[in-house]
Amino acid sequence: MSKIQNEQLLFELIQSLTKSEKRSFKLYANRVGSSRETKYIKLFDIMEQMDVYDEALILKKLPKTSKTQFANLKSHLYSQILASLRLSNLKHDIDIDLREQLDYIRVLYKKGLYHQSLRLLNRAKNITGDYRKDLFQLALLDYEKQIRSQQVFDLEEKQADELNAQTEQAMKRFMNVQQFFTLATKLKARFVEHGMVKSERELNNLKALFYTNLPDFKESELAFNEKFYLYRAYYWFSYLTYDFEKCITYAEKWIDIFHETGLDKKRRAGYLKGLNRLLQSAFRVNSIQKFEHYYSLFQRFEQQEGPSLASNTQVLLVKYKAIQAFNHVFLTTDFEGKLPEIKTIMQEVEANRKYIDKHNLIVIYYKASVYYFALKHYSQARLYLNRLLNDGDRLRSDLKGYARILSILIDYDTGEEDYMEQKLQAARDYIVFEENLGKVQQVFLEFMSKIGSIFPQDLKKGFMSLKAEIEKVNEGDFSQKTLLYFDLMSWIDSKIEGRDFAELVREKRKAYS
């Protein structure tokens, strides 16, 4: 996601509002009919109708407004929109609701209404238990100690011991959650930046990171949040090390604890993330049966929960839907039949593009380019490839390296071989610079650099030699993993046999299943 200039923050907030939220804001804003309120509503109306932020145009429509007044007006409008959103989300966001309950508990406590304060506190404790909100549980225990320490209560020693035991248990759980969460986040960050491990050195470094930061635990004694973040940490460790069977094990545990507690309907973002990772793992092990099972769960979730999801969770749904739709096509090899669905999904992606994180956009665009390559829709494939190739940062350099290789394949298949030597050298330089050059890429790039000197009648033999060479080097623990990114062997076979790439992929899939 691109950074937003300070002066455009209000504009971005207004543009993100749904029709329902805009209507709620107007009702909220019109509760007071002062001239100042009327002026900031006018500012809201102006900015709502703009496609691009234009401060000069806004000031023109707000005559006699100085720069200082305009800054104050924007600040006031921003805070009023947030206040309106808070109210409209109160019934649908448990965190906002609990914070309000904490405020009420505090207000009643300061008024000396300790029994009423404790009554609200006990109700809030039940909610935190239902939703497994450990941090709120700690805050409530702290308030309970303060309330019960007042002279209006006959605090017994046993009660004090019970409160202390509950607090120690909650703190221990919270510390475990923080350690598991930090470890999972570090592992995911490493994947987002560099991809999977590519050498023994990287593997040893990863193991050191994982095991030195993993606290002692007994899984059977862990509460929901501890298990949630523990399974996430183990999932990412397994994914980075290509142990996709273990990925399935921990992703299934991940979503099982949501089903067992009923939190799949309450903490939907966490559940959706687990379902996405489970589908990704089933795709990696080529398990159509397992993928279809969980894909049906994913689609049912979209139908039942999609309309009521918060905006950020809806964005999660959009990007995961795109990724898993492509994975489903690659597993079933129904390239042509799924074209209308893919077009619709990519329209949804583009509509939400500014809200989707760059990492997932890279993944979606790469998968889209492979999909359209299989269909021989080369212009569409290039469109998405260029979005990767023109991106200057180092996120997912592994995928960007393969994007360069795929671009070369398109040039070769379409006969556009101008500057092929320069493109090959640029691809090799990039992959070497990012430390992603494996034996498979090296052999392939070397072959392509010499292909112009091979006589047409010898091309078939040349591709047969390339295939044999790749099969020879594709035996190490890490070199063989490079073919996870693209079925290069099927492309080579298509040149040997004179058949379509998609046809060969489909044939291999049938043989595999």
Image (cartoon, rainbow, N blue to C red):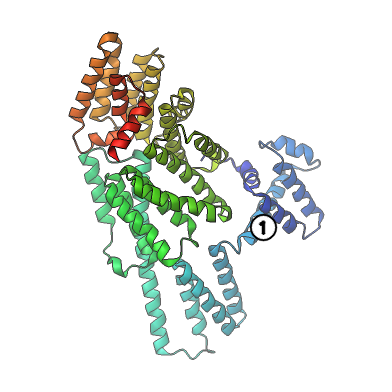
What quarter of the picture does the C terminus occupy?
A: top left
- Residue at mark 1: 84
**x and y, in percent, of residue 355 in the image:** 54, 43
Q: Position of residue 354 (x, y in %)?
A: 55, 40
Eyeballing the image, is 319 above or below 430?
A: below
- Please state if 53 lies on the left or on the right of 277 as rendered: right
Identify the residue at horizontal 55%, vertical 41% (top origin). Answer: 352
**Residue 359 position by quadrant:** top left
Give the vertical position of 480 relative to 208 (above or below).
Answer: above
Residue appearing at x 42%, y 49% in the figure: 295
Q: Nearer the viewer, residue 248 or 101?
A: 248
Left or right: where 461 falls relative to 182: left
Identify which residue is drawn at 32% across, 55% down. Answer: 250
Q: Quadrant of residue 429?
A: top left
Of 229 and 499, nearer the camera is 499
In the displayed structure, 144 sits above or below 248; it is: below
Q: Nearer the viewer, residue 95 or 462?
A: 462
Question: Which type of secondary structure does the marked residue at label 1 adopt?
Answer: helix
Residue 143 shows up from this direction: yes
Local packing at callout 1 (Cα closer than 10 Å; few below 14, some 14-19, many 20+) is: some
The amino acid marked with disc number 1 is Ser
Q: Is residue 224 left or right of residue 237?
A: right
Q: Position of residue 304 (x, y in %)?
A: 53, 56
**Picture quadrant where residue 420 is located:** top left
Position above or below: 150 against 320:
below
Q: Which residue corresponds to the image point at 37% horizontal and 26% vertical from the top-left?
A: 406
x, y (%) of residue 230?
33, 59
Q: How many marks?
A: 1
Q: Can the viewer see residue 136?
A: no
